[in-house]
Amino acid sequence: MIKNFNAKRIPLLVFLVLLVLLIQSIPVAVAEGQGEEEWEPIIDIRSDFPGQMIEAGDTAVFPITIRNLKPRRIGHRIQYWAFGEARDWDIRFEAMGQRIHRLSIPPGESRTVNVVVETPGDAPIGEHRIDVSFWDGSVTLFVHIIEAEVRIIDIRSDFPDQMIEAGDTAVFPITITNPKTITANHRIQYSAFGEAIGWDVRFEAAGQQIHRMSIPPGESRTVNVVVETPGDAPIGEHR
């Protein structure tokens, strides 16, 4: 076995081994290089003032700047996610005096959008979070309610009592006045007692059924309280 070994083949064998090792190392080096590349964002969203402190019932406006970092036009829907109590608030996007829901930004350019957040008069004190996103960019905004609005609202009715027959409909015009220096934005509600529980009671204004009102400071609004009584409503006074 030993005397048949050809020593002249050793250099060729070493060369082939080195060549195989070199070829195997090439894809490994490429894969490592690709894994080390950093992810580059497409959209950058910024807000110079992402937190605002307002009173309950006021409106917060957040100007945000959305920049397209790529050499191609980006068109996409702009969206928001509200958390906690803020999920029921009126939140919208505005640009150039119009309400929007989509943007198309040329390469390398930016656009300014206002995030408008209308808070109700009964918004709880504390910080409330709203996330805004466009394509792969996002920004977090915070509305901090510093004081719950004092409910100094004047409600009057010139005819608070009406006599009708069972099955008829009573309509009570009421006047709601906001004497404060800020806009009052509240849900309008009622409470029924005794036999009146379960009756069809609704609020109407300008020929439409409503459930919320926004009254500027110092102004008044007229609302009709419509009460439909059942045919078997008992005789007597109902509240």
Image (cartoon, rainbow, N blue to C red):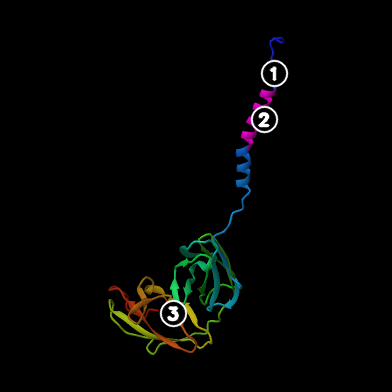
Residue 147 visible in the snapshot? no
Asked if residue 1 is positioned above or below residue 60 in the image, the reply reads above
User: If you read the primary sequence from the N terminus, does the residue marked by circle 3 or circle 1 appear first?
Assistant: 1
Residue 38 in percent (x, y) is at 61, 53
Residue 8's label in the rendered image is: 1
- Residue situated in front as seen by the camera: 9 or 30: 9
Q: Which marked residue is nearer to the observer: mark 3 or mark 1?
A: 1
Q: Main secondary structure of the magenta part?
A: helix
The residue at which mark 3 appears reads as: 213
Label 2 CA crowd tier, 10 Å (few <14, some 14–19, many 20+): few
Res 98 → quadrant: bottom left
Is 91 in the magenta?
no
Q: Residues under labels 2 and 3: Cα distance?
A: 83 Å
Q: Residues under labels 2 and 1: Cα distance?
A: 17 Å
Q: Is mark 2 on a helix, strand or loop?
A: helix
Residue 14 visible in the snapshot? yes
- Residue situated in front as seen by the camera: 102 or 172: 102
- Residue situated in front as seen by the camera: 216 or 115: 115
The residue at which mark 2 appears reads as: 18
Please name the amino acid that badge 3 sits on. Met
Res 211 → quadrant: bottom left
The residue located at (62%, 38%) in the rendering is: 26
Q: Which marked residue is nearer to the observer: mark 2 or mark 1?
A: 1
Magenta segment, which residues?
11-25
Residue 184 in percent (x, y) is at 49, 82
Please name the amino acid that badge 2 sits on. Leu
